[in-house]
Image: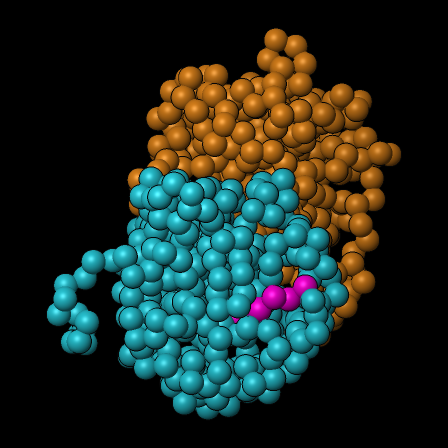
Amino acid sequence: MAGVRRTLAVDLAGWVLPTPVMIASGCAGTGRELAGLTDTRRVGAIVTRSITLHPRKGDPAPRIAESPSGVVWATGMQNPGVERFLQDELPRFARAGTALMVSITGGSLEEFVRLSSLLQNRPEVAAIEVRLSEPDDEMGRPVLGAHQDRAAEIVGAVARMSLIPVFAKLPSATGDVVELARAAVRAGAHGLTVVDSPAAMGVDAGSLKPSLGPVTGWLSGPALLPITLRAVFEVARAMPEVPVLAVGGVRSARAAVELLMAGAWAVQVGTTTLIDPAAPVEIARGIAAYLKDKRIPSPGDLRGRLRTPASLSTEALP
Amino acid sequence: MRRARAEILSTRRLGAYQSITLVAPEVAERARPGQFLAVQMPEGREFLLRRHFAVHQASRRGGWAGTLEFVVDPSGQGTAWLGGMRAHEFLDVIGPLGKGFAFPKRLTNCLLVAEGHGAASLYFLAQELLARHKRVDMVIGAETLERVFKPIEGKRLSQTIEIVTTDGSLGDRGSIMDALPEMAERSRAQVLYAAASPSTLERIAAFCIERHLPAQVALEERMGCGFGLCFTCVVPVARKDGSGYDNLRSCVDGPVFNPARVLWDRWRSDAPTMLPTPPEGLPVVRSWPG
């Protein structure tokens, strides 16, 4: 392998990142908090917290509780609204020098379309991530993107008008992740973020109360790794040409390598960033060490290295 | 704010609490009363998040220069692990975090009110106030004798002190709120500082508003990270101009707040949806007057 140039860079079908490790949505603050705790220039990309058309105050506290190897959380998508975000937070993120993917969410088609239009022609924004796990205000459903047709409608509307790559973050409340992924890609998604936090809840037996103010929330943390592995594996196997970003359970370089082998093009680190803000940089370093050790030239070359039984190539998994 | 791999210099039992002293010069140098530390938990356990502790002592000079002390109630997951740590082991610490207490410029008589190990950060505050030639009086309380934090230290730092316990095992039997009105009167308090549970703080806030007593309180809300990334530790705080309120992160905008601006009935409310704006409007509160 002498003479082969090793690199950590990954090419997400046209969007090139310096490392395959991103900070997941909701774990990067407002663009100023990470300075001093990590070198943001060495993070592959940052996904912002989810931005809505109008300001949201979010849910009442407490908003976070620990669970075995995870956290249950609910912020109610607190954010200042897209206008204030573009004015205050976006320039700060841009100064941090990291590629930026803006996460957008809402409960109606119109909100997504207007959000998407406001993010065009902003050179600081490299990509858009569409979060589909909010309640559907128009159809009166608990999770907007759980239905293929609805997910396709939203993602299609955002993607058609977008000049920058659009990634659909698939809700975990879905029967068949592959069909949902296909629908999003057919609608025009450039790539997929697999998979959003599953709905969860905590109970405090001591106080006879739910652990969270809004009662129910979402599960994040290392507990999710096996779920993410399976979803990434299935989606990547069905559509090997579509960039897949793995999110959920990336606690270590080892977990990241496992996800890259399962078919991810890059990984997003969420809960672990809250515990160790330097983790996204450390995990990238760990991936580099693994690649060097195994004499693999780049993270992209890990895709397809997973040795699965031959029977898998034709049969569908249960 | 700095991140440090800090050696434990000593750890000792104080009643129901464990006091841990770290060698962390770059953190100790910057720490002010009311600020806190985020301590990382060990790998390979099922609990993950950092634990957060108010700074009890930060020495910049003398034989203890560069050391930092915080107090743990070792009754929970994670804090029990910390309580069992020995000297010369290492902790990953981020700090100092948050906004600390502001010192009065003009006013002189300060009343410090603490419940349980809330006294840890107030004793640090008392030292700084004494260095500024202020008068310090205290009301400290807890359920039992073991949960009264360093009562002798409290006596040393204050002009007068009232100690109350729920079971009467130390000082008077009763609660902080029983002792507070008389103490505020007797010490001619002009400024009040408090660190206590949310329900006690709410009552202290009502007391201060009624008496027009400027106050600062250190809140405890459950945190995810402790440095502003996750927006989970929010407290509803009225805007200064009365135009509404914002859910502020207690880790970066707190943990010290003006209790007159905290919307206590909204904070940790049992009502699942947000309360409407009250008919009398949201409070208009000037900033810290001292």
Number of numbered markers: 0
Label the orange chain with its letter. Answer: B
Prevailing secondary structure class for the magenta stretch in the rendered image:
strand
Split into 4 quadrants, where in the image is the N terminus of chain A? top left
A283 lies above or below A228: above
Q: Can residue A125 be seen in this view?
A: yes
Q: Give the range drawn in magenta.
A: A124-129
Give the color of chain A as drawn: cyan
Residue at 48%, 16% in the rendered image: B9
**Relative side of B257 to A248, left or right:** right
Of residues B193 and A81, the one nearer the viewer is A81
Question: Where residue B222 sits: x, y (%)?
Answer: 49, 50
Q: Where B174 sits versus B266, above or below?
A: above
Q: In this view, does A177 lie above or below A276?
A: below
Q: Where is residue A250 in the image (x, y as percent from the top left)?
A: 38, 52
Percent x, y for residue B204? 63, 47
Q: Residue furthest right?
A: B106
